[in-house]
Each structure stands twice: as C-alpha cells, then as structure tokens.
Amino acid sequence: MISTVSIIIPCYNEQATIRPLLESILSQSYPRELLEVIISDGLSRDGTRNQIAAFQSEHPELRVRVVENPSRTIPAGLNRAIDAAQSDILIRLDAHSMPYPEYVTRCVQALEEGRGANVGGVWEVRPGANTEMAKAIATAATHPLGVGDAMYRLSPKAGPVDTVPFGSFRRGLVEEIGKFDESLLSNEDYEFNARVRQSGATVWLDPQIRSVYIARSTLIALARQYWRYGFWKFRMLLRYPVTLRWRQALPPLFAVSLIGLAILGIWFRLASLALIAELSIYLAVLLSASLLMAVRQGNMWLVIGLPLAITTMHLAWGGGFLWSLLSSPVQKNG
C-alpha cells in the first residue's frame, strides 16, 4: 500500500517564494492524489494569501489547505499544520525552499526502508537576490568556515546525523516524543531531533534527498537570522547541554575573546597585541579561503563579500548566544 503524505509548511509574508515552492511540490514524482499540502500561515500581510489562492484556483488537482497560525512562530505553525494533516507521513518544508522532483518519493522510501525515524536531505543554497552580496551570502552558507560541520549544507554521505533540515517522519513519532516545542522561536528542528535521538531512534540524512534553499539577500537580514539562531541555541542548550558541538561553541568564544581583549587592552598592552594578532590571523584565514573560492567560482568580488558574510554570521550568532546567556531566566534567578 502506497502511503499518503502531508506536506506541512509554516509561512509568514512569503509572497516572493510561496509560489515557486508550490510549483515545485506540483512537480513531484509522487502521485498527486496521495499528497496534501498544509500551509500554516501567520496572518500574512503581504500578497502571500493571494498567491496561494491563485495557485489553488489554477491547480485543483493538488490539495492545498491553509490553516491560521495567530502565534506567527515557526514551531506553532508546524504544530497547527500537524493537527490539520490527515496523512500518516508528514514532510516538513520551509516557505524559502524548493524540493527537487524526487524529494517526496525518496523521503517515503527511506522511511519505509526503516533508515531513520526522521529523514532529511541536503540544501542547495541559492542567492536571495541578483546582487554580489547575496551571492556571497549564499556561498558563505555552504562554506565550512561559515557552517562548520553542518552536513546538510555540505556534501555528506548517507548516514545518522544530529539533525536534518525540515525532515520527514511518521505521525507515530510525534505521538511518541511530542510535537515541536513552541517555547523555542528558533532551533525547533534541532530540539525535535534531540528528542528523536533521546528516544533511541535515528535521524537519517540522505544526500539524494535534495532541496533548494533561498538564502538571505543582505547582511542586515543575515545578521538578524544568525542572532536569532544564536539566541535560541543557548535556550535549547539549557535543556540539552550534551548536544553542544564545537562549531556552535566557537562563535561565542570568539566574541568573548574580542570583547575581553579589547577591555583588557585599555590597561594592558599585551592584551592589545593579542587582540591584533587574533584579528590578523582571523582575517588572513578568511581572505585565503575567500581568494580560493573567488578563483574557483570566477567571481573576484567574493574576496570582499565572503569575509563580510562569514564575519557577520560568526559575530551575530556569537552575540545572540551571549545575550541569551546574560538575559536567561536561569541566570537571573540563580
């Protein structure tokens, strides 16, 4: 018996990307009559709902339903979509994504073969605009200096991992470990997968499960995104400290070292020299990597744009993490 599938999508003000996403779902190789799409909309104020309505009118052969998400947060939106879904298999997608045609088929196949309780794939990150800075940000989002060992952004082999983007799973998994944690406004996927692994189940990454992800287009948008990532990562680590990875510890340590050496440098010349040395090494590493990438891609603007993007990612993530630590209720009440 072929499984029915509900694709769940949290959404808020995604006028530019919701239509390409729906069209990519329409192009899936999986039988359309076995698919339903549940869009959990956070009361969008742009033309998102008009785009969805137009698609529904033009393509009645694909079942697309919209549910309201007044909380306007991603985990709440996912949970509202899960509540409305009618299928046994749930596939979580993002309004900034476009799955390849075999995406659903490969997710279902991996689940039915028992490879993991939560199965996901890799991102092909594309620029959010046709600008040099947007191209640099997209490159940074898949560079080891920017994302460390986040396998779903690199070129991994199939196997067990800590987390996957989006993910596909059976309803029984949600019934066993619970839905997404609505107290976390980011890192909800990682926290969900931490519970999957705590239950003794496997999170499986298959590089043949591919989707396009549209990166942020400006440094300001990138900084906001990574500040949010860092802030909520600390809140998640309060519950799951053993899930901390080296790539997540480095940005806050780097930010602390810069702040500490800058303050100590007011009184101690050695601290100032150490700060200069640290920044010089950091810049040299970034410029070397950026030059190599610029030559490889034939885009010399990356020599400037890639260091700016990666530095923004590091400092915003580290700053958000530290601010979360300092403002944590645990710290205040301790």
Image (cartoon, grey):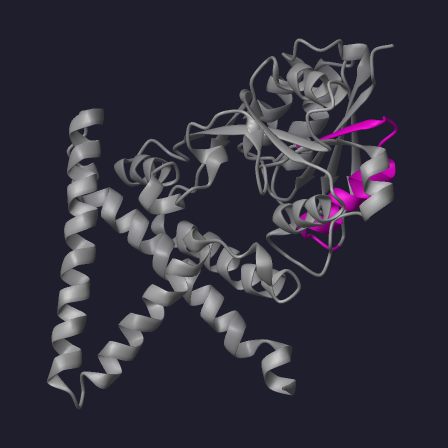
Front residue of 180/118: it is: 118
Q: Quadrant of the C terminus?
A: bottom right
Residue 225 position, x and y percent, is: 48, 52
76 w.r.t. 165: above or below: below
Q: Is residue 79 left or right of residue 304?
A: right
Residue 44 seen in render = no
Horizontal and vertical percent position of residue 122: 51, 28
Depth check: 330 or 64 in front? 330
| Left or right of 239 on screen, residue 277 | left
Q: Is residue 116 visible?
A: yes
Q: Measured along the vertical axis of the image, is residue 314 above or below residue 205?
A: below
In this view, the residue in front, 248 or 324, is 248
Q: Residue at x 20, y 40 (%)?
A: 290
Is 90 colored magenta in this rendering?
yes
Magenta span of residues? 71-92
Is 115 positioned to the left or the right of 213 in the image?
Answer: right
Q: Nearer the viewer, residue 310 or 33?
A: 310
Res. 24 image quadrant: top right
Using the image, determine if residue 165 lies above or below residue 124: below
Q: Is residue 200 magenta?
A: no
